[in-house]
Image (tube, rainbow, N blue to C red):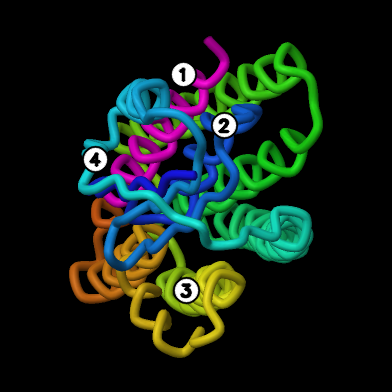
Amino acid sequence: MKKSVYRIPQMDCASEEQLIRMKLDGKNEIKNLDFDIPKRTLTIIHTGDSKEIDKELKELNLGSELVSITETNDPVNVVETNKKERKMLWAVLIINFVFFVVEMSFGWISKSMGLVADSLDMLADALVYGLSLLAVGAATVRKKRVAKISGYFQITLALFGLIEVFRRFLGMESLPVFQTMIVVSLLALVANSISLYLIQKSKSKEAHMQASSIFTSNDIVINIGVIVAGVLVYFTQSKYPDLIIGIIIFGIVIRGALRILKLAK
């Protein structure tokens, strides 16, 4: 067997990891995938050459580059690895979906488009994890159909969100409740940190060494962005910081949805 190591510069979030898993799922020559999000690397144990793997990874446009390829005789327990990954995926899916509901609810109550947009980002992650679970043992046609539905669903929600943001830009809306924005975003930040910790823990016995990767996640940067927007709403007494962060997050959700749609081709 061979061990190929790839550097993937744009793999800065657990969602990108799951997209890669779905892209490579079903390829019999691949025996194991080992992700290191902090270092942006992917190690693949496989048979045969790596040309087809190279092609599949490049189609995701994440900047993948083959760093090295060597022979290996390391044993791979695929069944045990898959079992652990399924447990991890269920855990982070539930966390993300619960906070989608929490942020969406408090977002509308507090009139914060930043929270509403962040809730859709959490939903997008939950859908990616759900797709990864469905992909196990599923037929290729079914996987592509589910991926397509998920991608279009995300884009539709994000576009409705953008329309609402622009309506609020032009309308005389009351200020969002900055206290709610800050508190709920702090809770979401904790939830994202736990999710990423679980993901890293599932791949390394020295999980505490992977904790620093929490701070490289796009989701956590988004949470911090909403918190900053809440603070700016308080100091400026303006709705615009909340609307601007909403536009940015909706754009990120659409970008993620377009990547999922690529899997459906």
Q: Give the range drawn in magenta.
A: 245-265
Label 1 environment density (alpha carbons within 10 Å; few <14, some 14–19, many ≥20):
some
**Is the Cβ of the residue at disc 1 closer than 8 Å to that at disc 4?**
no
Residue at label 3? 189
Please indicate whether residue 23 sits to the left or right of residue 140 in the image: left
Please indicate whether residue 70 sits to the left or right of residue 95 in the image: left
Residue 26, above or below 46: above
Q: Nearer the viewer, mark 1 or mark 2?
A: 2
Give the Cα separation between the discs numbered 1 and 3.
29 Å
The residue tagged with tag 3: helix, strand or loop? helix
Q: Nearer the viewer, mark 2 or mark 3?
A: 2
Give the Cα separation between the discs numbered 2 and 3.
38 Å
Nearest the eye: 3 or 82: 3
For marks 1 and 4, the one nearer the N-term is 4
Residue 183 highlighted magenta (yes or no) = no
Q: Main secondary structure of the magenta part?
A: helix
Residue 95, above or below 251: below
> Can you give x and y, in whole percent of width and height, for residue 116 in the image?
52, 50
Give the Cα separation between the discs numbered 1 and 2.
22 Å
Residue 251 highlighted magenta (yes or no) = yes
Residue at image x 29%, y 36%? 62
Q: Residue 262 carries which label?
A: 1
For marks 4 and 2, the one nearer the N-term is 2
Q: Which of marks 4 and 2 is in front?
A: 2
Label 4 environment density (alpha carbons within 10 Å; few <14, some 14–19, many ≥20):
some
Q: Which amino acid does label 1 sit on?
A: Lys
Residue at label 2? 29
Residue at label 4? 66
Residue at image x 40%, y 71%? 178
For marks 2 and 3, the one nearer the N-term is 2
